[in-house]
Image (cartoon, grey):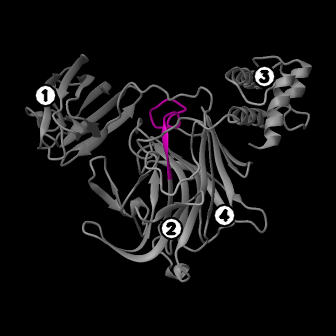
Amino acid sequence: MNKRIICTAAALMLTWGCIPSQRSTAADSARQSTDVRLLRDWLLGTEQLSAEQAEAADQNGDGRLNAADLTLLKRALLHAQSSAAPCWQDEFDGSTLDLTKWSYELGNWKLDANGNYITNGWGNNEQEFYTDSNASVHDGILTIAARKETHTDPVQGSYDYTSARLSTQHRFSVCGGRIEVRARCDAGKSLWPAIWMLPEDSAYGGWAASGEIDIMEGWGSTPERICGTVHFGDVWPNNTYLTNEYRFPAGESAAGWHVYAIEWERGEIRWYVDDVLYSTQSDWYSANHAYPAPFDQNFYLILNLAVGGHFDGVDGIYADPSVFADGEKHFEIDYVRVYDSGGFSPSPVTSLPLEAYIEGASAGLVNKDGSSVIQVQNAGSLEYAVMGLVRGQKVHAGETRTLSFDASATVPRSMVVTAEDASYTRLLDQKVTLTQEPVHYSFAVTFAEDLSVDLKFQLGNIDGAAALGDHTVTLANITWE
């Protein structure tokens, strides 16, 4: 911990009537949180400060109180909270990757929740094939190695480059706090190191409606700069992003060791390099959901070194083979540390979001807080021509799960509700009749083996629905427990 930050936090506590200590306590954090709220309310014109409080609140010493002082105060709070041990960390002290903390994401293709191939290049035109042999741990350092070598997969084909991508998905995720990573990366055109986060549960729908946080991304061709970004908005292609670049001081670059960090609180994310603040973002949204969605849920960590692709590839696609003329290239990580934010917990989600599936029909789906609304213009000819989906729900042998929801429609019609495995075997199969009055439904199913199942609300041509014309179906309070 930076000693200057500790002293700043301690002085702050003294002036505002708190008791300083060498290590932050829960009571200290609570009092400092009160200080943050007090300054915020003063800036909003709803609170008064004494002369002593105003002097203490002037964090940058410029004689004025403004949003910059509030940001510095919040930062001091997070640093004081993080003076205790991290709530999660990996110092890479062993001789192998700790698979209780990390898993390998393999291949070149993006997969859906059932392991079906969606698109190659991880959606970014990346040229590498990720393996479980391109990452190693030694001397306290995790090394991800990108290599120019032929790799052939019986399903995905042949590739000229390999690398590694590691994730904490299903092992660790966090909502808010300080996340910091000390790392360096070799330079070279088409190298794309990244430290980033994705939602553990896509509570607001598919990418990027549920968000993405990029703590650090680097251009191998211009190692003198990196960037920090958030992706959000709606499901692709209706998504958007906010980003800022950091340029290293003269003589420095991403090829040297630096600490990349975010401080993430409810309604604000701040990016740092070596404790220098270079970006603050708060103006995000998730379509049809209340702010601060989507960045109010648990996110997991990803470390990877891509080769080629739209970020720094030749023509936005290809890798530059000359970069590997002197051998493999390394993305090295000294540590990953996560500090608790002190009370920032995920917003409750009252209804699972649905994914639209439409085949030979005309329909649209909008996820809102607490409900999903499906507008059917033409129900098509198939029972499953229009569906709302919840994909890839993991269940275990002997487990009983209950699907509950409220449903209504602007015209009377039938809906088929199923839970299906990867072979489309129906483990739950129920037909219900919808009317304008919402009705609550609850169906339990017990599973005989470990499976991944899709939940399907089928609204195609069932009982003559093709003749109904334009109508709306609302599904609310969808739970799977």
In this view, the mark in front (3 or 2) = 2
As drawn, is 57 to the left or to the right of 455? Answer: right
| Front-most of residues 209 and 332 | 332
Is 285 drawn above or below residue 51 in the view shown?
below
The quarter of the picture where the N terminus appears is top right
Query: Marks 2 and 1, how far apart in space?
Result: 51 Å
**Mark in the foreground, 4 or 2:** 2
How far across and down, in percent of the image, does residue 148 sit?
A: 45, 77
- Would you place residue 206 above or below residue 36 in this image? below
Residue shown at 72%/36% (left/top)? Answer: 79
383 or 73, which is in the foreground? Answer: 73
Q: Which residues are magenta?
A: 286-302
In this image, 301 relative to 266: left or right? left
Please tell me in which quadrant of the rendered image residue 210 appears.
top left
Nearer the camera: disc 3 or disc 4? 4
- Amino acid on which disc 2 is placed: Ala
SS for dot 2: strand
- Identified at 40% across, 61% down, the residue is 132
Q: Are marks 3 and 4 in contact (CB under 8 Å)?
A: no
- Which three-letter amino acid code belongs to the residue tagged 3? Trp
In the rendering, which numbered label is found on residue 430?
Answer: 1
Q: CA distance from mark 3 to mark 1?
A: 57 Å
Q: Position of residue 336 (x, y in %)?
A: 59, 48
Q: Is residue 222 visible?
A: yes
Q: Few, some or many C-alpha atoms within 10 Å of disc 4 (few <14, some 14-19, many ≥20)?
A: many
Q: Which residue is mark 2?
A: 145
- Cα separation, mark 1 vs mark 4, equals 56 Å
Q: What residue sits right under mark 3 in the picture? A: 42
